[in-house]
Image (cartoon, rainbow, N blue to C red):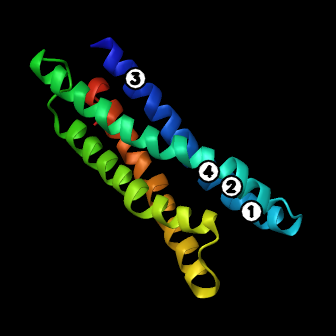
Amino acid sequence: MWVIEFLHVLMGILWIGLLYFFNLIQVQSMPKMVEEGAAKPYTQIILPKALFYFRWSALLTVITGIAYYVVGRQNGLQGIPSSSIMIGMTLGIIMAFNVWAIIWPNQKKIIAGALEGDALAKAKRTAFLASRTNAWLSLPMLACMIAANHGIF
């Protein structure tokens, strides 16, 4: 049981850490990187690897979270089931969907250089909005996950 919980927390830290990196650092730094000619090396070398860890940690967080929920429910673990854990799980699943169905497909096209003009601007904006949505959803999601065992609400 503790192994599943440990993996869930570890994958969640990686996922949310990268989410905050993209939203708080990359978005703010990209204009300066473009200006200084560093954007292309970043998008070709660092970004693909970061997005790899981002999308797979999102999926593994959801998988280990569901496994933890199922095992915890069978063993009568405190906080499972509860309304706060269900809300947190739902938000996490929505966030993972955003990663795999919206952010990653758009980023893949951007990195490949497959888009130009309005199509490129639209893909960037769509990926940005989905990522920013995830950043905002992460706050109530984390609060719900903590509340399930610590009774915040």
Q: Which mark is residue 30?
A: 1
Side of 39 where 153 appears, left or right: left
Q: Which mark is residue 145?
A: none
Mark 4 or 3, which is nearer the eye?
Answer: 4
Q: Secondary structure at mark 1?
A: helix
Nearest the viewer among 80 and 122 is 122
Q: Which of disc 4 and disc 2 is earlier in sequence?
A: 2
- Report the amino acid beneath label 4: Pro
- Report the amino acid beneath label 3: Leu
Nearest the viewer among 40 and 68 is 40
> Disc 3 marks which residue?
7
**Do the CB atoms of the residues marked 4 and 3 lie less than 8 Å apart?**
no
Q: Secondary structure at mark 3?
A: helix
- Residue 65 shows up from this direction: yes
Q: Secondary structure at mark 4?
A: helix
Q: Secondary structure at mark 2?
A: helix
At 50% across and 67% down in the image, what residue appears? 106
> Disc 4 marks which residue?
48
Where 25 sits versus 144, above or below?
Answer: below
**Do the CB atoms of the residues marked 1 and 2 lie less than 8 Å apart?**
yes
- Report the amino acid beneath label 2: Gln
User: Residue 52: x, y in percent?
Assistant: 53, 45
- Residue 152 shows up from this direction: no
Q: Which of disc 2 and disc 3 is earlier in sequence?
A: 3
Side of 152 where 23 appears, left or right: right
User: Residue 35: x, y in percent?
Assistant: 86, 69
Quadrant in which the C terminus is drawn: top left
Give me the C-alpha separation between circle 4 and circle 3.
23 Å
Q: Residues within 10 Å of mark 1 (few under 14, many from 20)?
A: some
